[in-house]
Image (cartoon, grey):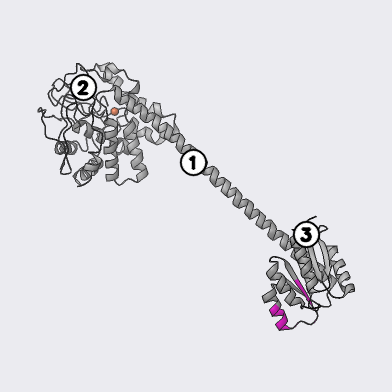
Amino acid sequence: MNRPAMVLVEQDPQARALLRERIAAVCPPEIEVIGASAAEEALGVLYTLREAGRSIEMVIAAQRIPGIPGGRFLEIVSSQFPGVIKILLSDRPSLDEAIYAFNNAGLDKYIPMPWDAEDVKFTVTTLLRQREMKRMNERLLVDLKTRNEQLTVAMSDLQQARHDLESSYIQTVESLAVALEAKDRYTSGHSQRVARFARLIARGLGLPKEEVDTVGQVALLHDIGKIGMLDKILNKPANLTPEEREAIKSHPVVGAQILAPVKTFEKHLAGIKHHHEMYDGSGYPDRLKGKGIPLEARIVTLADAFDAMTSTRPYRVGLPLEFAMLEMKKMSGSQFCPDCVDAFIRVLQSSGVMEADLLGAPAQAPAAPPGFAAPVAAGALPPDVDVPAGFVAPSDVAMPPLRLGGAIAPATGGAAAPVDGGGAGAGTPAGGAPGDAADPGRRQGDRS
Ligand SMILES: [Fe+2]
């Protein structure tokens, strides 16, 4: 039986019996009150109780007991049985004795002799209640700590599950984006390059990392709406009909509709839907204007056009960086957001940035499909290329390589690097480019 116990040390049998009776009357019934006549006997009882695994609630000792005085006995109890309540009964307390007992024995209470029954009752019940409350608090703290640990683990598992789910969604859509580029010879590799450029612009604007990441993801997915479009339209090597052009122009809205059901892409929708808006309000689908165009969209529009101008395609060679920068400046405030243009040009002109970020972009392009007339006279752009209006590509296929931040980038060889699904062709002269290259007023992005 593991009943908790209390030990009472009093030399006089009658006084011990009377005191034991009083204490037992106020103790919870499960506590056994054990009497002892001397310190040595009491220590023997205490060791036996501990070996039996029984809880020792309290030790009450008279100062006058055989052998070791009560104060010294309780000092030993304090060292050998920490946490036990200790009460000293003394008929001739001196100040020195009292101070010594409290300091060294860790007394919880001193009761003067002759003891008063009510005083003993009140002291014992109060100390036992305090002890129970302390234990209850300790149990609550342990329980709270356990629950906090369980909650932390659950939150971590939930976050991991959410992260895994989001990663799965993102990978799925990125796979769709890759599949899209595989079916559109104009845009192969384009999205990844636009994502790199868009991130550079976003960093140049001083956006925090989280927003830079979002901009990069928007850029990667900006043309996802073309996934459902017919290959014969996307790859049409001739001018588009008005109906076909309208179909292509629906891709920003279609892309937003594809991603709308997934909460993960909530913050990407506006950038995707409006990546063909123009700063002067002449874009689509909603003819938004200026800062009314979501910042992500303004960034992607510029990155999209930049890739369209600088990447090599089957029908032309990418333009020099200096030329692209001039075109961006020229169209700043009309086609492009001036803040974005300024930020991008600062990045492009900074040393050490472009080699790592631009040259690292995937540049491999698919071979021109059979029957595709390449290279054609440079300057002919497919109808989906949002090159700035007025843009005229040089006609010499053997153009100098793209120069990046002072470094010389190797020219993309042979098969052209894919063009970002960018905008409508700029005012490029007719030159055999597929689609509506002969439309001089068109800007990049019609197909992209
Ligand atoms: Fe597009």
Question: How would you rate the neighbour count of disc 1 (Cα within 10 Å): few for under 14, some for 14-19, many for 20 or more?
Answer: few
**What is the x, y in percent for residue 144?**
61, 51
Is the shortest distance between ligand 1 and the CB of mark 1 under 8 Å? no
Q: Amino acid at mark 3?
A: Pro
Mark closer to the observer (3, 1): 3
Is the shortest distance between ligand 1 and the CB of mark 3 under 8 Å? no
Look at the numbered discs 2 and 1 and tell me whether their residues touch, using CB distance below 8 Å: no
Cα–Cα gap, marks 2 and 1: 45 Å
Q: Amino acid at mark 2?
A: Ala
Specify whether 126 is left or right of 373: right
Task: Report which residue position mark 3 lands on.
Answer: 4
Front residue (pair 278, 208): 208
Is the shortest distance between ligand 1 and the CB of mark 2 under 8 Å? no
Mark earlier in primary sequence (3, 1): 3
**What is the x, y in percent for residue 423?**
24, 28
Q: In the displayed structure, would residue 84 be above or below residue 89?
A: above
Magenta stretch contains residue 398: no
Front residue (pair 320, 383): 320
Mark earlier in primary sequence (2, 3): 3
Task: Report which residue position mark 1 lands on.
Answer: 159
